[in-house]
Image: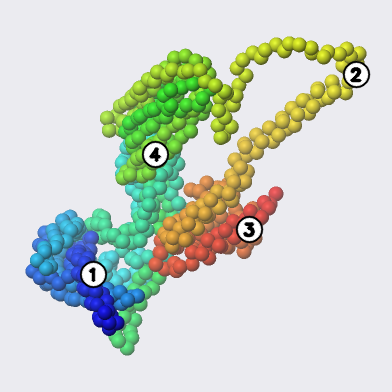
């Protein structure tokens, strides 16, 4: 076969492969806004990828009227990489509607034919919001602000508490102790936000907190009290109340910079120029009523609230003396699962039992925390015989049934045979051999000798008295010093402040490598706030920029280092609430945070 003939065959194969590849991957998708305001127009785009369509049909949308469509546009691209050709094409069908009636609707599937095959889009949800009360009837009240109309956001206009506010809301107003409740803190605004800075965070005294992931962007619209607002979640968490009575989440304070517009004359006529305005915003406080759990409480109740199931197992089932075995107790379900205490197992007295090891695998799920927690008990039988590990009762309070539910494991009958050797020693050194038998009397010549030295005259006799006394004195001195340090909580927190912060910065470095800016700035900010709270001895809920400056000055920190601390906090908080304006300097922020902590660690506190 000639060389030219071979080249022609290769090109034919490649061309056939390219045609086949271009015919693959046909898809038909819909793109539409999630929310629109009644009276406004909106578009829905249906895109056909890698196919030539015919017979396009768009669904009717309840609550909306079709105005125009379909408008068809086509695009095509082809590339050749490393001798391989690939191509793609798309056809977009755009439908224009007018939103007529407020409500939540499900939009059906659009369809199109491609090479004799019918393709359909997935149905999607659409919410039509009522118009602002001030804009109903086709006329706008004087001075009213619309979130989607820059003409109503003129510079110099007073920004009222109805135009921008922060709201703390709870998913329940009353609940039981240890019952889960979702707390959400949202920013509602009719203006664009260029900078958002918390100066006083809300406090959650009396609650255990499980943080939930959020997106702080102004990416949704809500209708509140007859008005439409752009909304951003500032914080969302699951709370577990630890006491009964009225518990209050205190209000927070925020510095906010909003964007207004000023009309200026140019060669092209009047144009809108953005103007920033600084505001101070204070959130509401939220109160919930906590009902105590009913009395009397069962003896087997240790604080579990929610809904659970249990399992247990013993391994191995064939036992020998002095060999380790395990008893596993597993709890699955939802509620305050992370805070469940280990159950008390009534092991036979002939068993040597060690403290249980716990393993928690639980995560937020909806409005509660779900998963499982397991407790593993290690025990060693000491004697031959037949033994029983009795059934274990586990009681939890069911918040739906509003009563206590008791679950029981099965009882285990064990037969222990004679084993060889001694008890195994655990890796942690927790299992140690004991003196179990009486040693035999030694027989034979003992090589006894007579000695005429008086014991009281020997130095070793007195040394055996002096050394224990000195050891006890040293031990008492060390123990009293340790107790004094442990009683000084601030000293302990200060000692461990940098260690904890570096662990958090380690996680921030991981997010930096993944280029995950949201989680990076969140973890860096947590590390800085947590470090300053421990270092300065101020609860996290009471920290703000003013008292941080004051406390750093009292501590003896240089003014330049203090400014660098505030600068790191500002950068992280600004990046959280305005990521699109924060730039991409995560590496320098992480380096600055680590440098600040290092300098604070090397600063000696003023006496």
Q: Earlier in the sequence, mark 1 or mark 3?
A: 1
User: Which residue is the site of mark 1?
Assistant: 21
Secondary structure, mark 1, is helix
Residue 322 position, x and y percent, is 53, 22
Distance between the alpha carbons at the discs numbered 4 and 3: 37 Å
User: Which residue is the site of mark 4?
Assistant: 240
Viewer-side label of 4, 1: 1
Task: Using the rendered image of the protein, determine whether residue 41 is visible from the camera's viewpoint.
Answer: no
Name the residue rendered at 23%, 60% in the picture: 34
Name the residue rendered at 35%, 40% in the picture: 370
Viewer-side label of 4, 3: 3
Residue 268 position, x and y percent, is 30, 87
- Is residue 524 found left or right of 607 in the rendered image? left
Name the residue rendered at 66%, 36% in the picture: 482
User: Which residue is the site of mark 3?
Assistant: 599
Q: Earlier in the sequence, mark 4 or mark 3?
A: 4
Please tell me the numbered disc located at residue 325. none
Please tell me the numbered disc located at residue 457. 2
- 591 in relation to 386, above or below: below
- Is residue 255 found left or right of 551 in the rendered image? left
- 219 in relation to 399, above or below: below
Q: Earlier in the sequence, mark 2 or mark 1?
A: 1
Residue 30 position, x and y percent, is 19, 64
- Is residue 481 found left or right of 214 in the rendered image? right
Secondary structure, mark 3, is helix
Distance between the alpha carbons at the discs numbered 1 and 3: 60 Å
Residue 96 position, x and y percent, is 15, 70
């Amino acid at each position: 076969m000639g060389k030219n003939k071979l080249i022609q065959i290769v090109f034919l194969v490649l061309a056939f492969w390219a045609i086949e590849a271009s015919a693959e991957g046909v898809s038909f998708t819909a793109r539409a806004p999630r929310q629109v305001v009644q009276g406004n127009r909106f578009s829905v785009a249906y895109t056909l990828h890698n196919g030539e369509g015919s017979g396009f049909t768009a669904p009717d949308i309840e609550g909306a009227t079709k105005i125009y469509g379909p408008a068809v546009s086509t695009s095509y691209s082809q590339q050749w990489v490393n001798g391989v050709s690939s191509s793609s094409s798309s056809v977009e069908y755009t439908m224009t509607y007018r939103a007529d009636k407020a409500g939540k609707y499900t939009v059906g599937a659009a369809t199109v034919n491609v090479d004799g095959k019918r393709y359909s889009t997935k149905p999607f949800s659409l919410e039509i919001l009522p118009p602002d009360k001030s804009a109903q009837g086709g006329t706008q009240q004087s001075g009213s602000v619309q979130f989607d109309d820059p003409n109503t956001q003129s510079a110099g206009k007073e920004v009222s508490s109805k135009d921008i506010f922060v709201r703390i809301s709870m998913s329940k107003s009353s609940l039981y102790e240890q019952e889960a409740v979702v707390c959400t803190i949202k920013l509602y605004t009719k203006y664009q936000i260029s900078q958002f800075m918390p100066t006083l965070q809300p406090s959650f005294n009396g609650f255990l907190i499980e943080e939930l992931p959020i997106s702080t962007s102004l990416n949704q619209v809500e209708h509140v009290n007859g008005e439409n607002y752009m909304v951003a979640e500032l914080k969302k968490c699951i709370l577990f109340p630890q006491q009964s009575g009225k518990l209050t989440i205190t209000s927070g304070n925020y510095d906010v910079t909003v964007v207004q517009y000023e009309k200026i004359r140019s060669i092209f006529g009047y144009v809108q120029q953005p103007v920033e305005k600084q505001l101070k915003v204070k959130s509401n406080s939220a109160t919930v009523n906590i009902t105590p759990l009913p009395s009397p409480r069962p003896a087997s109740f240790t604080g579990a609230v929610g809904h659970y199931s249990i399992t247990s197992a013993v391994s191995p089932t064939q036992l020998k003396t002095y060999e380790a075995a395990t008893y596993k107790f597993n709890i699955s379900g939802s509620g305050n699962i992370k805070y469940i205490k280990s159950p008390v197992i009534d092991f036979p007295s002939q068993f040597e039992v060690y403290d249980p090891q716990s393993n928690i695998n639980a995560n937020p799920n909806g409005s509660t925390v779900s998963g499982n927690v397991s407790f593993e008990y290690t025990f060693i039988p000491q004697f031959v015989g037949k033994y029983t590990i009795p059934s274990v009762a586990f009681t939890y309070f069911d918040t739906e049934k509003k009563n206590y539910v008791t679950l029981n494991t099965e009882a285990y009958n064990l037969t222990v045979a004679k084993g060889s050797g001694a008890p195994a020693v655990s890796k942690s050194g927790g299992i140690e051999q004991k003196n179990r038998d009486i040693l035999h009397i030694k027989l034979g010549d003992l090589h006894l000798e007579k000695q005429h030295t008086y014991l009281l005259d020997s130095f070793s006799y007195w040394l055996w008295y002096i050394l224990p006394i000195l050891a006890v004195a040293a031990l008492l001195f060390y123990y009293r010093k340790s107790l004094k340090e442990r009683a000084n909580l601030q000293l302990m927190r200060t000692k461990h402040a940098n260690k904890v912060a570096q662990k958090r910065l380690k996680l921030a470095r991981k997010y930096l490598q993944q280029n995950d800016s949201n989680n990076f700035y969140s973890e860096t900010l947590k590390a800085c706030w947590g470090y300053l709270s421990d270092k300065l001895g101020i609860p996290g809920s009471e920290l703000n920029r003013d008292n941080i400056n004051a406390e750093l000055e009292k501590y003896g920190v240089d003014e330049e280092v203090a400014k660098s601390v505030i600068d790191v906090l500002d950068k992280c908080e600004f990046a959280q609430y305005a990521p699109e304006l924060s730039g991409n300097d995560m590496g320098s922020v992480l380096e600055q945070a680590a440098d600040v902590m290092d300098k604070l660690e090397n600063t000696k506190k003023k006496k």
